[in-house]
Amino acid sequence: MLMADIRHVFTHGENCYLASEDISSLAHGLIELGTDKDLKSRIIKGGHELVEEKANIHNELEKVETLLTGLVSQQPS
């Protein structure tokens, strides 16, 4: 159930490594990340970009400001 909940934010192989909850899948993922330097670099870069885009305080403040400005402009004078 958790996988379905996070797939709208995370993309396997681009900004995270998604594995099933079974130990074999987790082990395979750890081995792959430890041996595939391109995959590791891509996930690190994608993760940083995701955080910058989704968790950037400046972007979030702009969204709140836009929302509040819209609400204020809808109020009768």
Image (cartoon, rainbow, N blue to C red):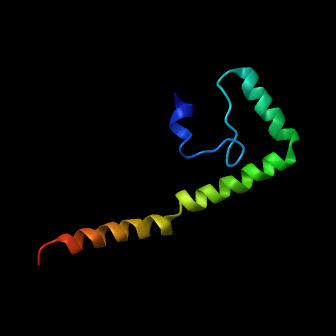
26 is higher (above) or lower (below) than 40: above
Picture coordinates of residue 38 (x, y %)? Answer: 84, 49
Left or right of 15 on screen, residue 2? left
The residue located at (52%, 27%) in the rendering is 1
Residue located farthest toward the left when viewing the structure as drawn: 77
**Quadrant assignment, res 18:** top right
Query: Looking at the image, is 53 positioned above or below residue 14?
Result: below
Q: Kindly identify the residue that appears in the image at 53 percent across and 57 percent down.
A: 54
Q: Is residue 58 left or right of residue 64?
A: right
Q: Residue at x 70, y 39 (%)?
A: 17
Estimate the x, y position of residue 76 in percent, counting from the top left: 12, 74
* Quadrant position of the C terminus in the picture: bottom left
On screen, residue 43 above or below 63: above
Quick check: 54 left or right of 36?
A: left
Outermost residue to the bottom: 77
The image shows residue 70 at horizontal and vertical percentages of 28, 70
Q: How many marks?
A: 0
Residue at the (36%, 70%) spot, across then down = 66
